[in-house]
Amino acid sequence: MGFVTPDYGTIFWMLIIFGIVLFILKKFAWGPILKALKDREHSIADALNSAEKARKEVAGLKAANDQILTEARREKDVILKEARDIKDKIIADAKAQANAEAQKSIEYAKQQIEAEKAAAINDIKKQVAELSVIIAEKVIKKQVENPQDQEALIQDMLKDMKLN
Amino acid sequence: MIRTIRALLLILIVLFTGQVAFAEEEATQTNTTTHSEEFNAGKFVIEHVSDAFEWHILTIGETHISVPLPVILYSSAKGWNIFMSSKFHHGHETYNGFRIEQEGENEGKIVEVNEQGEVIDLPVDLSITKTVVGIIVSVVILLFIFLNIARSAKKNAGKAPSGMQNLFEPIILFVRDDVARPAIGEKRYEKFMPYLLTLFFFILVNNLLGLVPIFPFGANVTGNIAVTMVLALFTFFITTFNTNHHYWKEIYNPEVPWWLKFPIPLMPIVELTGVITKPVVLMVRLFANMLAGHLIVTVFVSLIFIFAKLMGGPAGYGVSVVSILFSVFMVLLDVLVSFIQAYVFTLLSALYFGMAKPEHHH
């Protein structure tokens, strides 16, 4: 058999056999195999996609968390500031009130002192008057023993009285 | 590069073996008294790579051990004749008016003879020859492998591949992603996948089995031009039946200056030649590559016997070391070539499919 002249018997069998094999493999082998490959590729792609999605979601959650945190921090600062303001105000108020109270007390004390002073002065005056009377009595008693002195005294006194 | 080296080697070897065979003929003519069959390198090499009606395994002394194969003949005179090739006794005898012609223009073919031994007719020969058995063996292996893989693919749906599936999936993916997709295009490649995969693995399995020198492997299937012709024809017809009007317009009315088309349709002739050339090139490339590989290996082996005969036994032993080294190298090279040729045939088929429906772009 020549090498380069194709033998029709071989062609005949080859056509039949290759045709049958092509048909069988196409129907029972390549279909399922290629489908399995495709399905697997799809499932891997899906898994990757969902992983990516989950990653993005987590990133989103994190961003939201951060936002919430910063907001909370800001709120905390605001609250703290408010508290500080209130504290300052309360202290200032208390101080003012205390001052007023103290002023009032001082005022009252002053008044009391004035009153006491006046009373004391009056008392002194009274005692001085009494003392004066007593002294005068004694002096008079003594002077009156002598009629001249008595006269002089009365004269003197009268003089004073006039002046008054 | 490999192909040019291969072609040069082939030419050298053909010249060389031709001379040896010629020398042998003279030797046997002078030595006809001793009936023992002399070693004939040319015959040995040619027998190894050519088709046969029986599968010769080995010869011990005078005894030929071979597997008889069915011979199927149809002649207008005798109708259908089906019998085993052992009836021919290795081509020495005539059976039922048929015999294997040993020389002349019908050498190697079965002819119908009359009682006087004259050739009267050439029967229609649909015998299951060595090549056909080789095809059947490879096909059984193919079916076994891929039906198995399909089963495990169904069973392991959605899971990681296992076993044989694991081994072949990368190759299937290679054919899909590196051959079919770029060559045919994303839209249409799926339609051609079954053919391209069958083609690739058929060629690959046959190329590799052809390198295994043990029965029932080792038949020179892809080095048989009838086999590669059928494969090329499949590609040709699939290409032709999947065309659009751009494809035919490029052939019959390509956009070239009018004087290239009228009055002599120069370009259409060139284009039409191209259509025919493509499958012919596919056919010849695979056939020549595989045949050359087989030839070289057998020639290296026969060198041992040639030297032993020309210069005595010790020379044969000496040469055998070199020969075996070269043979091993060539077989390894052929393993590479097996993959390359399967790839090239598939890739070119895919390219032709892709070109058959070009997108119109100008």
Image (tube, coloured by chain):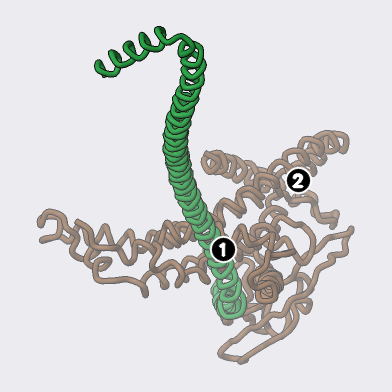
* Residue B301: numbered disc: 2
- Residue A99's tag is none
- Residue A73 in percent (x, y) is at 49, 46
- Same chain for mark 1 and mark 2? The answer is no
Q: Is residue A114 left or right of residue B38?
A: left
Nearest to the observer: residue A113 or residue B237: A113
The structure residue drawn at horizontal position 56% and vertical position 73%, both measured from the top left corner, is A35
In front here: B257 or B85? Answer: B257
Q: Is residue B338 above or below residue A120?
A: below
Q: CA distance from mark 1 to mark 2?
A: 57 Å
* Res A67 seen here: yes
Q: Is residue B120 visible?
A: no
Q: Residue B271: image x %, image y %?
A: 27, 60
In the image, what residue type sits under mark 1?
Ala
Q: Residue furthest front?
A: A147
| Element carrying mark 2 | helix
Marking on residue A47: 1
Q: Secondary structure at mark 1?
A: helix
In the rendered image of this protein, does residue B223 appear above or below residue B323?
A: below
Quadrant of res B166: bottom right
Q: Is residue A131 left or right of residue B19?
A: left
Q: How many marks?
A: 2
- Seen at 70% across and 76% down, the residue is B155
Amino acid, disc 2 = Val
Identify whether B324 is placed above or below A57. Answer: above
| Residue A144 placement (x, y as % from top left) | 46, 13
Q: Chain of mark 2?
A: B
What residue is rendered at 72% in x and 60% in y? B218
